[in-house]
Amino acid sequence: MSKSTLWSIVGVVVAIAIAWVIVNVIFSVLWFVAKLVVVLVVAVIVFFVLQRMFARNDG
C-alpha cells in the first residue's frame, strides 16, 4: 500500500467523521427550532383560550 493510498483512506475517514458531526449539529438545531415553533403555537392557543374564558366571566 502506497503512502498516497493510506492518506486517501485517512482523508475519507476524517471526512466521514466531520460530516457526521455536522449532520448531528444541524439536526439538533432543526429539532430545537421545531420544538420552539410547537411551543409558540400551543402558547398562542392557550393564551386565546384563557382570554376568552376570562372575558366570559367578566361580562
Image: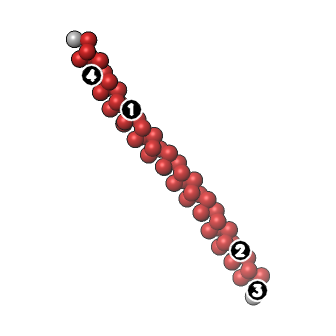
Q: Amino acid at mark 3?
A: Ser
Q: Nearer the viewer, mark 3 or mark 4?
A: 4
Q: Quadrant of the N terminus?
A: bottom right
Q: Residue at x 42, y 38 (%)?
A: 39
Name the quadrant containing residue 16: bottom right
Earlier-in-chain disc, 3 versus 4: 3
Q: Residue at x 40, y 41 (%)?
A: 38
Q: Which residue is mark 3?
A: 2
Label 4 or label 2, whichever comes before in sequence order: 2
Locate the C terminus by quadrant: top left
Residue at numbered disc 2:
10
User: Residue drawn 51% across and 54% down?
Assistant: 27
Toward the viewer: 4 or 55? 55
Which numbered mark, 3 or 1, is in the foreground of this view? 1
Residue 55 % position (x, y)? 26, 16
Q: Locate residue 4, reporting x and y percent.
A: 74, 81
Q: Are marks 2 and 3 in contact (CB under 8 Å)?
A: no
Residues at discs 4 and 2 in contact (Cβ within 8 Å): no
Q: CA distance from mark 4 to mark 2?
A: 63 Å
47 up-or-down from 18: above or below? above
Give the labeled residue for mark 4: 52
- Position of residue 24 in the picture relative to residue 1 (left or right): left
Say if mark 4 contacts mark 1, CB within 8 Å: no
- Cα separation, mark 2 vs mark 3, equals 13 Å
Name the foreground residue: 45 vs 14: 45
Q: Nearer the viewer, mark 4 or mark 2?
A: 4
Which residue is denoted by mark 1 in the rendering? Answer: 43
Residue at far front of view: 57
Q: Secondary structure at mark 3?
A: loop
Of label 4 and label 1, which has the lower sequence position?
1
